[in-house]
Amino acid sequence: MPRVFISRKIPGIGMQNLRKFTDDFLVFPYDRPITENELIENIGDVEGLLCLLTDPITRKVIGAGKRLKIIANYAVGYENIDVEYANKRGILVTNTPGVLTDTTAELTWALLLACVRRIVEADRFTREKRFNGWCPTLLLGSELYGKTLGIVGAGSIGTAFALKGKGFGMRVLYHDYYKNEVLENKISAKMVGLEELLKKSDFISLHIPLTEKTYHLIGEREFALMKPFAYLINTSRGAVIDEKELIQALKADRIKGAGLDVYENEPRIPEELIELPNVVLLPHIGSATYEARNKMAETAAENLIAGLTDKTPPNLISIPNTL
């Protein structure tokens, strides 16, 4: 019976399906991200690893898995895994795409609305018992109707996010490598270069993976291009924004505000960013619904079981070997 190591307890249905498949598995007992050394200590004799995006699946970890056949990531992204090295070792790597598209798109809208209508600030104001009646100038925000929404990365989540905004009557610009006919046909979105998008958008939402090309994609130059009343929303990966430059842009009012669900050195957040009043900060909850997290667990377990029974997992990741 294959031995499996799970780096964090996952929601019910995933665990249920794994228990039906094997009773020879170990779940990391602590409710915190596992370290590289702890992974190495636990992976020596296992054939299957179910891990999280927070887990550093480095060459050292992969090399310690002498019997490892498959790494099933409980996430859509997989930048935490050295996929190229795993492929070279003949180890399968999988992810959980498609199951959190709408969930993350909905959270992105919640974050955008919280920023532009100052929801967090208004809640705190009310709880502090400072509300003493309606006032013409109290906590004024921005309207969405008739404004320009810029989507950087028109993949599945970026597309779902844009489509959900149809009811707001916004003009949509998007920047991507490929033409998005769905957005163009359904909401008359226009494909533009990044510079044009930054200059013309009132609200900018990032939906791109973290790669060498997208690292610090939004930095000093890009902030200088944005409108002074623009809002920047990021639910993709923290390091696509140069966090130091974001802090400076917010401090200097070069942009109106920002909403973040992800951070450059997660879970560490700079104190300067925490103290700023014109940013809304969330603890990486883009996929945090019962439905999405259960489906992620089910998909990760399905991938793991397929790999351990010599079947092709439904969500196999492969990177060409360049070593």
Image (tube, rainbow, N blue to C red):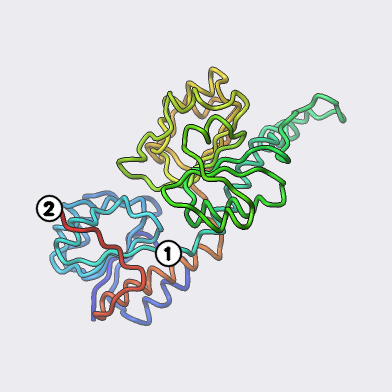
Crowd around label 2: few <14 · some 14–19 · many ≥20 (10 Å): few
Question: What residue is pinned by disc 1?
Answer: 10
Q: Is residue 205 above or below residue 142?
A: below
**Secondary structure category for the residue under label 2:** loop
For this rendering, which residue is in front, 55 or 238? 238
Q: Quadrant of residue 254?
A: top right
| Residue under pointer 2 | 323
Where, quadrant-wise, is the N terminus in this rendering?
bottom left
Distance between mark 1 and mark 2 Cα atoms: 34 Å
**Residue 164's spot in the image, x, y percent?**
64, 54
Image point (61%, 44%), residue name: 172
Hey, what amino acid is under mark 2? Leu
Q: Which mark is residue 104?
A: none
Circle 1/circle 2 CB separation < 8 Å: no
Answer with left or right where residue 100 lies relative to residue 27: right
**Residue 235 versus residue 47 in the image, above or below:** above
Q: Give percent across and percent down for residue 14.
A: 43, 71
192 vs 316, left or right, is right
Marks counted in the figure total 2
Spot occupied by residue 129 in the image (x, y as percentages of width and height): 77, 30
Of the two numbered discs 1 and 2 on the same chain, state the one appearing first in sequence.
1
User: What amino acid is labelled 1 in the image?
Assistant: Ile
**Residue lying at 54% horizontally and 27% vertically, measured from the top left:** 226
For mark 1, give the secondary structure: loop
